[in-house]
Image (tube, rainbow, N blue to C red):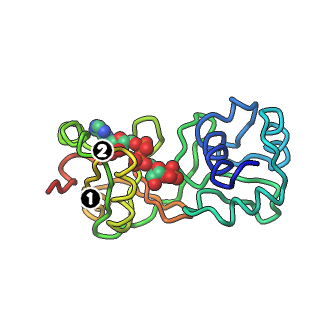
Amino acid sequence: MKSHADISKFLSYVLRHQPESVGLQLSSEGWASTDELIACAAKAGWRLTPEIIEAVVRDNDKKRFALSEDKLHIRAVQGHSTKQVAIDWEEKVPPTMLYHGTATRFIESIRQKGLIAGSRHYVHLSGDEATAVAVGARHGKPVVLKIHAERMHQQGYAFHQADNGVWLTLAVPVEFIAFE
Ligand code: HQG
C-alpha cells in the first residue's frame, strides 16, 4: 500500500520532471488529464483512483498540486523541469525582500554566478525565512540568502507567484543577493 507521501513523490516526478517516463502528455500549462494519469500510472504499477488523487492533492503539505474545478485535470503548481511545460505566468510585484534557502557548499559558486535555475525552469524564492531554511536543509547545511526582490523588479526583472505561494524568477544576479 503506497502512502500519500509516496504518491506525492510519484506525482511530482511525472507532473514536473519526467511525464514521458510513464507515457503521459502535459499541456504547456502543465495540465494532465486525470484519467490519462490514472491509466499511465497503472501501467507503471501505481494504483491510483480519482478519490486517492483528490485526497493527495488536498492533504499535500506544500500544496504542490492543483485539480481543475471539474477535477478532470491535474498539474503541479511549480517546480517544473520538463520541456513539455512552459507556463504563461502572470507577472506579480514582489515584496521588498524574498529569501532563498541553499546549502553552504553552493555559496562560492553563487557568489560567482548568482542564483541560476539549474534543471528547473525558475529560481525558487520564499516569502519567509523559515521556509527558506527548510528548503536549504534539503541540500546540506542550510544558509538563507536575502534577495532584493523589489529592486530587481524596479530594474525590469519579472517575478511570478505560484498558487502555493512560492515565488519564481529566471535568475538572480549577484548584486541583488545579500550574503551575510
Ligand atoms: C542551488 C522544493 C551553485 C540552489 C523547495 C539550490 C523549492 C546554485 C540548488 C523547490 C547556484 C537547486 C526548489 C549556483 C542556485 N551555483 N548552486 N550559481 N544557483 N544554486 O532543488 O530552490 O518540496 O532545483 O541554491 O521547497 O532547492 O520539491 O531548487 O540549492 O520550492 O515541492 O542549486 O523545490 O519544493 O536545487 O528547491 P533545486 P531549490 P518541493
User: Which amino acid type is marked by label 1?
Assistant: Ile
Nearest the eye: 51 or 123: 51
Q: x, y percentage for residue 89?
A: 54, 55
Q: x, y percentage for residue 91?
A: 47, 60
Toward which corner of the image does residue 116 lie, by quadrant? top left
Query: Quick check: which quadrant has ligand 1?
Result: top left
In the picture, the disc for residue 147 is: 1
- First along the sequence among labels 2 and 1: 2
Q: x, y percentage for residue 87?
A: 58, 48
Question: Neighbour class for label 2 at 10 Å: few (<14), some, many (≥20)?
Answer: many
Toward which corner of the image does residue 145 lie, by quadrant? bottom left
Reply above or below: 29 against 180: above
Single out the residue that lies furthest toward the left: 180
Q: CA distance from mark 2 to mark 1?
A: 10 Å
Position of 173 with respect to 3 (left or right) is: left
User: Could you tell me if residue 96 is visible in this image?
Assistant: yes
Q: x, y percentage for residue 151?
A: 25, 62
Position of 62 with respect to 177 (left or right) is: right
Q: Are marks 2 and 1 in contact (CB under 8 Å)?
A: yes
User: Which amino acid type is marked by label 2?
Assistant: Leu
Quarter occupied by the C terminus: bottom left
Nearest the eye: 62 or 3: 3
Residue positioned 41% across, 57% down in the render:
159
Toward which corner of the image does residue 19 lie, by quadrant? top right
User: Could you tell me if residue 123 is visible in this image?
Assistant: no
Residue positioned 45% across, 64% down in the render:
92
Circle 2 SS class = strand
Residue positioned 35% across, 68% down in the render:
128
Circle 1 SS class = strand
Residue receiving disc 2: 115
Q: Is mark 2 within 8 Å of ligand 1?
A: yes
